[in-house]
Structure formats: structure tokens, C-alpha cells
Image (cartoon, helix red, strand yellow):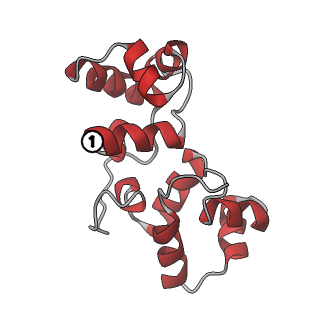
Amino acid sequence: MLVNTMYSKRLIELRESKNLKQYEVADLLEIYKGTYNQYETEYTIMPLKHLINLCDYFNVSLDYIFSFTDNKQFKKSEKQYKKELLGERLKKFRKDNKLTQERLADILNTTHSVIADYERGRYLISTSFLYEICKRYNISADYLLGRIS
């Protein structure tokens, strides 16, 4: 079963713009071609670390990959994401939107302890949770991840 369309069209467009085959992108990510194919077709959700690596390779934002913007130009201020900064920004976003951890967890169909772990910087947020938050609340994925100020 396919997941909700998040990035498939953009990944294909970017790969084809560089005349790359799926196996070549898989090699860049150090994964199997079949695994990359499942990500590109959105049969399974690509982990954020791979999406970020592709953003860096193609020099585009995560917001562009997610189709939140059509602007390909991206000037990131940070080389890599920071789980701790994501945690701080996620907590601030949640409080600015008057959401408890429990309410945000309900929206994302998870537990409040998962949200607490993200806010403490213990884990990198899942791709689907990041996408849902950004789409629903019109906030930049690159901002939440600390890739831009």
C-alpha cells in the first residue's frame, strides 16, 4: 500500500534532471536500489537522513522536496540538522500553537513520550511526522530541523 504523496514527483524530477538512474542515487545514499525504488515510489517512507542527503546533493530545501515551495534556490545556514535545535523549535512551535504534547501526539497518532523524546533531542523526528506538522501548520521543515534560521 502506498503512503501519502510527500516527495515522489520531486525526487524523480531531480534525479532525471541530473540524468541519474535509481541505482546511482541508491549508491549515493549507500542503500540498495530496491530500497531506493520503494522510497521514490513512496511504497515506504524515506528516512529523513536520506532525504536531507538528497537535498544537500541536489542543493534544494526539504520544503522543496515536500512541495511546500516551488523555489529550488536554497541557501542553508547549517551544514547538518541538529536534533537538539529541532527539539527546541518543535517545543516552541507546539507552545505557540497552544498544543500539549498529548494533543500533538493525538494529531500524529503516536504517544506523548515520542513527542517528548523529539523535544529533548533524543531522536530525529520521523519523516511522516515532520511532513504532517509542516503541512498542517504551514511551517518550514528546514526551519524546524535547524537548517535555516
**Residue 132 sits in which quadrant?**
top left
For the view shown, which residue lies furthest in the left direction?
A: 96
Residue 145 in view: no
- Residue 116: % across, % down: 48, 14
Q: Which residue is mark 1?
A: 139
| Amino acid bearing label 1 | Ile
Residue 43, above or below 70: above
Residue occupying image coordinates x 37% and y 37%: 133
Residue 135, above or below 126: below
Residue 119 in view: yes
Residue occupying image coordinates x 54% and y 17%: 111
Q: Residues within 10 Å of mark 1 (few under 14, many from 20)?
A: some
Q: Nearer the viewer, residue 105 or 51?
A: 105
Q: Is residue 63 left or right of residue 34?
A: left
Residue 8, above or below 91: below
- Residue 139: % across, % down: 27, 41
Q: Nearer the viewer, residue 19 or 133?
A: 133
